[in-house]
Amino acid sequence: MMKLKFFRKRDTRRQLLCLLCILCCSWTVLAQKRISGTVVDGVNDEPIIGVNVVEKGTINGTVTDVDGNFSLSVAENATLQVSYVGYITQEIRVLSAMGGGIL
């Protein structure tokens, strides 16, 4: 039996495009900041377990823990959508000031 070896022709344009995509993705990650908070019931002021906290317009999200705490990396000037069954969904804008914070 004879073995045939095929070699791909080098496509530098494709390699440059891949490199550009990798660089763009890394810049996006660098433009994010880590935020954290606690979700509590407005009436009883008790933490709520399992609340969905999602960056609006993305699939980037998390769920609150047993103490109502969450932590999430979001883009600058992001808006959070906070939702839970039986409660009104709220949108909260994240401030981009040096200290961060939520408005």
Image (tube, rainbow, N blue to C red):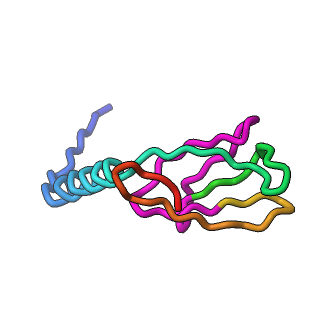
Residue 21 is situated, as x and y percent measured from the top left of the image, at 27, 56
| Residue at point 53%, 68% (across, down) | 57
Would you place residue 89 above or below residue 2 in this image? below
Magenta-span inclusion, residue 16: no
Magenta-span inclusion, residue 62: yes
Residue 27 left/right relative to 48: left
Residue 4 is situated, as x and y percent measured from the top left of the image, at 26, 39
Residue 21 left/right relative to 52: left
- Foreground residue, 77 or 41? 41
Residue 46 left/right relative to 56: right
Segment tinted magenta in the rendering: 55-81
Residue ranking furthest to the top? 1
Quadrant for the N terminus in the image: top left
| Residue at point 80%, 44% (across, down) | 46
Would you place residue 10 above or below residue 56 in this image? above
- Foreground residue, 88 or 41? 41
Question: Could you tell me how many numbered marks the image carries?
Answer: 0
| Residue at point 29%, 48% (across, down) | 26
Would you place residue 91 above or below residue 46 in this image? below
| Residue at point 33%, 53% (across, down) | 31
Residue 12 is situated, as x and y percent measured from the top left of the image, at 13, 55
Residue 55's image quarter? bottom right
- Foreground residue, 9 or 69? 69
Residue 50 is situated, as x and y percent measured from the top left of the image, at 76, 46
